[in-house]
Amino acid sequence: MSDDKDTEMLFPDQTISVGKEKITVHEFRYREGLDAAALAGPILADLRALMAEVGGEISPEALDQLIARHREIWLQLIAISCGRDIEWLAKLPDRNAMQIQIAFWGANSDFFMRRLIFGTMLAATIQERRSPSPRSSPN
């Protein structure tokens, strides 16, 4: 595998043209991702519940509704990813904002999926290690 492909896999940043301006939408780096995960908690919880409800097949309409319910958080996450403020994003024409949103999802969808998988794995591990009785057994 070439160095370019390795870099692309590690950092799936996307540079797009918005009007006459070039905008780079980047994948959250680790520390930034920790902060973003804390911010995205309600989105992740609703996404996890939605996936469980529909068996993993989420319709575009259901995803649009989820994003709309958490629009301020969603805008904050996109703003972080493209290095802009929310006011700048909010003033964009819909087509440009959607272009950035698509680039954001392209760069950060794995961020969301990793958090969903990690949360599920962690919960299963905790459940497995939990004693079946309410009190610990004596040695």
Image (spheres, rainbow, N blue to C red):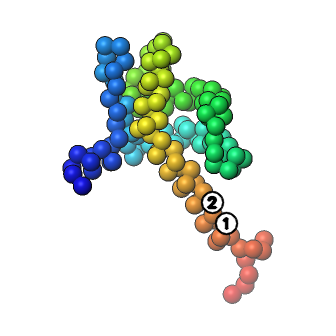
Name the foreground residue: 40 vs 94.
Answer: 94
User: Could you tell me residue 64's position as x and y percent?
Assistant: 61, 29
Does any portion of residue 45 appear in the rendered image?
no
Residue drawn at (27%, 48%) of the image: 5
What amino acid is found at the position of numbered circle 2 in the picture?
A: Ala
Q: Is residue 88 above or below residue 125?
A: above
Q: Is residue 29 left or right of residue 67?
A: left
Q: What residue is shown at x 64% (from left), y 37% (from top)?
A: 59
Q: Secondary structure beneath disc 1? A: helix
Q: Residue furthest left?
A: 3
In the picture, which quadrant includes the C terminus? bottom right
Indicate whether 78 appears above or below 52: above
Q: Is residue 40 visible?
A: yes
Considering depth in this image, is 38 or 64 the residue closer to the camera?
Answer: 64
Residue 6 percent coordinates (x, y):
27, 50
**Residue 117, picture quadrant:** bottom right
* Residue 127, numbered label: 1
Instruction: Identify the image quadrant of residue 137.
Output: bottom right
- Note whether 24 is above or below 38 in the view shown: above
Please tell me how many numbered marks the rendered image carries. 2
Rounded to the nearest whole Å, what is the CA distance between mark 2 and mark 1? 6 Å
Which residue is found at the position 34% from the left and 33% from the top? 14
Q: Which residue is mark 2?
A: 123
112 with respect to 14 (left or right): right
Label 2 with label 1: CB-CB less than 8 Å: yes
Which amino acid does the dot numbered 1 rest on? Gln
